[in-house]
Amino acid sequence: MLPHVPEAIAIAGRLIGQTHPPYVIAELSANHMGDINRAFKMMEEAKAAGADAVKLQTYTADTITIAHDDPSFVIQGGLWDGRSLHDLYQEAQTPWDWHPALFAKGAELGITVFSTPFDPTAIDLLESLNTPAYKVASFELVDLPLIARMAATGKPMIMSTGMASLGEIEEAVATARNNGCYDLILLHCVSGYPTPPADANLRTLPHLAAAFGVQAGLSDHTMGVAVSLAAVALGATVIEKHVTLARADGGPDAAFSLEPAELAELVRGTRAAWEALGRVTYDVEASEAGLRQFRRSLYAVADIAAGEVLTEAKVRSIRPGFGLKPKYLPDILGRTAQRAIKRGEPMDWDMVSPKKS
C-alpha cells in the first residue's frame, strides 16, 4: 500500500504542498564561473526575484569522476561536446571552502540554501552546515547507497527522475523510505540541456505523484518559463530552474539558465498559475458579480399597445439582464400585452396575458 501523501512538507519552515504556492528553487550549478562574489550576487538576485531556495552542487572533479583519457570519459554531442568529464567538473565545481560562506549568505538574505551531494563526504560537509534538505540529481538516482546515506539523515529529500525507468524510480523511492526519509518529493525531469518542450511530457506529473504517493514537481531544463507554468497547472508543487546573471557571460550551464528578470517572471507566473487553480466551484465570484446585470434577458424593442400580440419584432433577447430569462421567449410569443409596454422596458410576467390552455 502506498503511504499517505503528506498534505505539506516543510523545508526550513516553508510549507510545500497543493495548498501552498509552488516552491521555486534557483539552481546555481556552475554559473558562478569560479567567482564567489558572482555566486553571492546570484543569490541576491534569486532572493529579489522571490525564489524560495538556492541550490548548490557539492562535488569535486575527483569525487564525481576520474581523470582518464579513455573515450568513454569524453562527452559526445550536445552542449559540452568534446569535453572530458574531469575537465568539465573541474571547471564547474563549487569549491568546498565556499560552502560555509554561501550558507551564511543565505541566512543573511533570508533565502534557504541546500545542495546536491555527489558522494558521502559531501553529505558530511552539508550535515556540518545543518543543511535543511537534500537533492538527488537525475544522474545519481541509480546510486542507491548514496540515496540511503542521505535518507539516514532524516532530512527532506527531493529527487529528480531524468533518464530513469519506472523501476529505477521505484528502487530509489524504496531506498529513501527504508532508510529514514519520510518527506520525499519527486521531480519529473528530462535531462536534455536544453530540453525541447515537446520532450517535457508533463502529463507524467500526476502519474508520478499517484504511482509513488508523493508530491511531484518539475526540474525544468527547457528555455523560458512556459513549461514550468504548465507544470503547476498539472499539480507541480516544486519548480527547479537553473539561473545565471546573464547568459551572455557564458558558463557551463548558462545557455539554458534564466536571467534574474526571467526568474522573477517564473515566480510571479507560477504563483498566478497556482492561484488560478482554485477549487471546483460554480459560484459567482466577486470579480464578476457586478456584471450579471449585463447578461441577456427579454425586452420590448418597440412600443406595444395593450392587447397587441407579442411578436419577435416587438420582443427580443438583448442585454442587459433585468427582464425575463431568454428561455421564456418561445413561451410568451403569441400572447397579448396586458397593458401598454414602452420600448426599452424589461419584460415581466404581469405584462403578458395568461397562457391559453
Image (spheres, grey):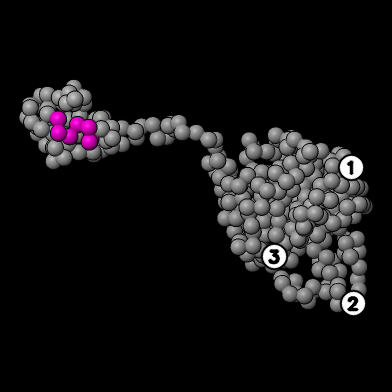
| Residue 250 appears anywhere in the view | yes
- Residue 355 as seen in the image, left or right of residue 63: left
Q: CA distance from mark 3 to mark 1?
A: 32 Å
Q: Nearer the viewer, mark 3 or mark 1?
A: 1
Which residue position is annotated with label 1?
Answer: 179
Q: Disc 1 residue type?
A: Asn
Q: Which residue is mark 2?
A: 69
Q: Position of residue 98 (x, y in %)?
A: 83, 53
SS at circle 3 = loop
> What secondary structure is marked by label 2?
loop
Q: In which quadrant will I find the N terminus? A: top right
Q: Which corner quadrant holds the C terminus?
A: top left
What residue do we see at 57% from left, 55% from top?
226
Q: Position of residue 318 (x, y in %)?
A: 23, 39
Q: Amino acid at mark 2?
A: Asp
Q: Which residue is mark 3?
A: 193
User: Which one is nearer the viewer's eye here, 112 or 308?
Assistant: 308
Decide: few, some or many residues near mark 2? Use Cα within 10 Å; few <14, some 14-19, many ≥20: few
Query: Quarter of the image holding residue 328?
Result: top left
Please indicate whether residue 5 sits to the left or right of residue 233 in the image: right
Residue at 66% x, 43% y is 237
Q: Secondary structure at mark 1?
A: loop
Q: Nearer the viewer, residue 182 or 238?
A: 182
Start and end of the magenta stretch?
A: 329-335
Label 1 Cα crowd, 10 Å radius (few <14 / some 14-19 / many 20+): some
CA distance for labels 3 and 2: 24 Å
Residue at image point 42% right, 34% down? 287
Identity, as a three-letter code, of the amino acid under mark 3: Tyr
How many other residues sit within 10 Å of disc 3, few (<14), some (14-19) or many (≥20)? some
Task: Please tell me whether residue 304 is drawn above or below residue 204 in the rendered image.
Answer: above
For residue 58, side relative to residue 13 (left or right): right
Q: Upstream in the sequence, badge 2 or badge 1?
A: 2
